[in-house]
Image: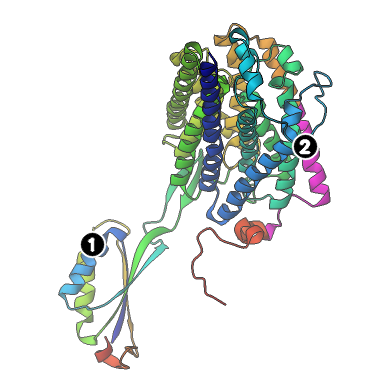
């Protein structure tokens, strides 16, 4: 099993969710986060004084997948979240040791 | 004839009460404006200050303030004497006995309505203070200051002008209180801010200003609109009479001019911000509306609507430059109250002779200097006494955590709470 963590532009969330549904992803966790990469921040103005916004709003998606489809999942996210501009985000893939569905106690692939 | 007099008395009293209620609602405007322009961690505390100061103003003015400002028989033109609580209202038979020609020389509306209209003005002056000292002053010393301000400092200078004291006799002209209310609030605030110092981290060592953006601009905008609405009562009610053609026209003129000045202030501040910063700074635009309103308050009757727009527009430009200037000399006023009510209050008072032949620059200067020195000096003394006795500033740690938690023990937007 793999844990896929993707950080994307907020307005791309709908597209990514639809693309993931197509490859058979049946659940995900979404968090509003802030951060920066190569995009860096930008400058804003308040009552004549400048300040920089270093941490930009992003959406973090966490998906647990069976080992068999994780590459499709990464492709789906890459395709749907892509705008070709700085700040499109990143996808992190890590090994996932165990998953338990709380309601039934099922574990492993059955719990995903 | 008696029916007509009854009706006039009732109409003028009703008009006065409704205008007073509009001014009362300005307390909501100040609360929302201030809650919008402070950081989220200081929201509950600034709201507590606002509602508590309003209540204190009402009680102190009833106990002693009203009698200082409007003494039955004054000791002298400088000192009105001291008495407590409100007297009885007008006796109907005596009011109705008044001959038509003398009607407006005496009591043509309820005495209680007069008190009500006056008490909400004190609260307005005190609300101005709460914004300027926001985010770093302790709650309780602030409320003690409110007691002194509303019971004594404000009423005494109010007596000098509106109560028939020496400023009134000298020809000082202040229709609805650019000086008596707004300059007074700003001077009390300035004295407090000077003793209190800026918020932690507001000014950097290299002289640059660290912006501390307000948490909720929709609230600040709503607050400004509420103040704008309340101002129709503030200025419109200050005509004091409605019930004949001439006075009704005058009240309408005041409404129109008050509105025009606010509009002028908004447009002028918008353009000034655009030219100065390259962007349309909403907070400056909101201050521009207040600036326009304060500017016209000293004389909303005699200008044409065109003049009123212009007077308001100058207020809108002044408020922006005044805010930048205060930042430059390291006076930290989170909501721009000292600029909008003080700097522009000065302009409003000095603009009176431009459209009112009855006013002179000399008398306006005398009024400004008298009110300014009295309120600043008396406030400074009170703030200093509070500082050396109980302290007026929260600790560094409390300021960093936010006054909501340290002073009120309660956040404005609590998350992740669990029952214990």
Q: Secondary structure at mark 1?
A: loop
Instruction: Determine if the magenta segment contains residue B378.
Output: yes
Which residue is painted at 45% across and 25% down in the image? B259
Which residue is painted at 70% across and 44% down in the image? B197
As displayed, is residue B70 above or below residue B355?
A: below
Asked where in the image residue B403 lies, by quadrant, the reply is: bottom right
Nearer mark to the viewer, of 1 and 2? 2
Q: Nearer the viewer, residue B309 or B419?
A: B419
Alpha carbon distance from label 1 to label 2:
61 Å
The dot on residue B180 is: none
Residue on which disc 1 sits: A82
As displayed, is residue B93 above or below residue B385?
A: above
Which residue is painted at 18% across and 69% down in the image? A19
Q: Nearer the viewer, residue B12 or A112?
A: B12
Which residue is painted at 47% across and 26% down in the image? B262
Q: Secondary structure at mark 2?
A: helix
Residue range in magenta is B374-397
Residue B130 x, y percent position in the rendering = 63, 43
Residue on which disc 2 sits: B380
Residue B179 x, y percent position in the rendering = 65, 24
Q: Is residue B73 visible?
A: yes
**The C terminus of chain A appears in which quarter of the rendering?**
bottom left
């Amino acid at each position: 099993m793999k844990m896929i963590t993707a950080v994307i532009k907020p307005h791309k969330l709908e597209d990514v969710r639809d693309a993931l549904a197509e490859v058979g992803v049946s659940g995900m966790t979404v968090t509003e986060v802030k951060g920066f990469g190569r995009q860096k921040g930008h400058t804003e103005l308040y009552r004549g004084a400048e300040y920089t916004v270093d941490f930009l709003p992003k959406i973090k998606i966490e998906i647990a997948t069976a080992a068999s489809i994780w590459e499709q999942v990464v492709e789906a996210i890459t395709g749907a979240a892509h705008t070709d501009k700085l700040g499109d985000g990143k996808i992190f893939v890590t090994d996932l040791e165990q998953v338990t569905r709380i309601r039934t106690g099922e574990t492993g692939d059955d719990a995903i | 004839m008696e029916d007509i007099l009854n009706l006039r008395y009732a109409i003028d009293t009703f008009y006065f009460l409704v205008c007073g209620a509009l001014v009362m609602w300005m307390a909501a405007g100040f609360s929302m404006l201030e809650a919008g322009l402070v950081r989220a961690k200081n929201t509950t505390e600034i709201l507590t200050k606002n509602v508590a100061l309003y209540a204190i103003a009402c009680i102190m003015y009833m106990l002693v303030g009203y009698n200082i400002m409007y003494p039955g028989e004054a000791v002298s033109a400088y000192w009105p004497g001291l008495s407590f609580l409100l007297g009885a209202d007008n006796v109907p038979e005596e009011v109705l006995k008044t001959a038509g020609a003398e009607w407006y020389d005496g009591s043509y509306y309820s005495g209680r309505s007069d008190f009500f209209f006056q008490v909400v003005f004190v609260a307005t002056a005190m609300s101005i203070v709460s914004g300027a000292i926001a985010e770093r002053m302790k709650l309780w010393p602030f409320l003690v200051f409110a007691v002194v301000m509303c019971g004594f400092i404000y009423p005494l200078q109010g007596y000098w002008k509106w109560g028939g004291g020496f400023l009134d006799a000298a020809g000082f002209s202040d229709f609805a209180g650019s000086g008596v209310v707004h300059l007074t609030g700003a001077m009390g605030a300035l004295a407090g801010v000077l003793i209190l110092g800026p918020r932690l981290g507001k000014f950097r060592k290299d002289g640059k200003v660290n912006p501390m953006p307000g948490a909720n601009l929709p609230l600040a905008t709503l607050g400004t609109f509420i103040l704008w609405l309340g101002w129709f009562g503030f200025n419109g009610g200050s005509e004091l009479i409605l019930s004949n053609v001439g006075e009704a026209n005058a009240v309408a003129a005041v409404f129109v001019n008050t509105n025009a000045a606010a509009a002028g202030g908004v447009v002028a501040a918008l353009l000034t911000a655009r030219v100065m910063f390259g962007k349309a700074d909403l907070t400056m635009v909101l201050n521009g509306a207040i600036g326009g309103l304060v500017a016209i308050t000293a004389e909303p009757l005699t200008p044409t609507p065109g003049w009123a727009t212009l007077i308001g527009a100058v207020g809108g430009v002044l408020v922006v430059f005044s805010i930048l200037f205060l930042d430059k000399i390291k006076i930290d006023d989170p909501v721009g109250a000292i600029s909008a009510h003080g700097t522009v209050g000065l302009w409003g008072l000095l603009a009176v002779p431009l459209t009112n032949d009855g006013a002179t620059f000399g008398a306006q200067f005398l009024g400004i200097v008298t009110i300014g020195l009295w309120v600043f000096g008396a406030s400074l003394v009170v703030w200093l006494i509070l500082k050396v006795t109980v302290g007026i500033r929260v600790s560094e740690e409390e300021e960093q955590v936010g006054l909501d938690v340290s002073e009120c023990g309660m956040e404005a937007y609590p998350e992740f709470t669990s029952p214990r």
